Amino acid sequence: MSELPLTPLGRIIKNGGAERVSEDAKVELSAFLEDTAEELAKLALNNAEENGRKTLKAEDISIAYKEL
């Protein structure tokens, strides 16, 4: 079950230029984004821990994003 709501994902795809979007496309994008977000969170957490923190900050996310 997807954690992300599919309706906004459909809007994102349409903002990318698609005229019509299937439910399967929304589900596939949701799965990809969730996997990518989890990987990003793990990298960000590693950065926070390397800096002696338990709290994840926006800068940790930014650094992790650049590592991806």
Image (cartoon, rainbow, N blue to C red):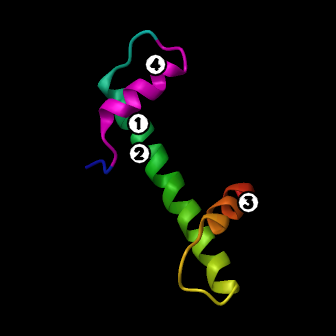
Q: Counting residues from the N terminus, which is met first, the one under dot 3 or under dot 1? A: 1
* Residues at marks 4 and 3 touching, judged by CB atoms closer than 8 Å: no
| Distance from the alpha carbon under mark 4 to that under mark 3 | 28 Å
Vertical comparison of 6 with 40: above or below: above
Residue 63: percent from left, percent from top: 71, 63
Residue 6: percent from left, percent from top: 31, 35
| Distance from the alpha carbon under mark 3 to that under mark 1 | 24 Å
Q: Counting residues from the N terminus, which is met first, the one under dot 1 or under dot 4? A: 4
Element assignment for label 1: helix
Q: Name the residue under label 3.
A: 67
| Residue type highlighted by circle 3 | Glu
| Distance from the alpha carbon under mark 2 to that under mark 3 | 21 Å
Q: Counting residues from the N terminus, which is met first, the one under dot 2 or under dot 3? A: 2
Q: Counting residues from the N terminus, which is met first, the one under dot 4 or under dot 2? A: 4
Residue beneath the point at 56% across and 70% down: 42
Residue beneath the point at 38% across and 18% down: 21
Element assignment for label 4: helix
| Residue type highlighted by circle 4 | Lys
**Viewer-side residue, 5 vs 59:** 59
Q: Residue 18 carries which label?
A: none
Q: Name the residue under label 1.
A: 28
Q: Counting residues from the N terminus, which is met first, the one under dot 4 or under dot 3? A: 4
Crowding around mark 3 (Cα neighbors within 10 Å: few <14, some 14 to 19, many 20+) is few
Residue 9: percent from left, percent from top: 40, 33
In the image, farthest residue toward the left = 1
Residue beneath the point at 51% across and 55% down: 37
Q: Residue 14 carries which label?
A: 4
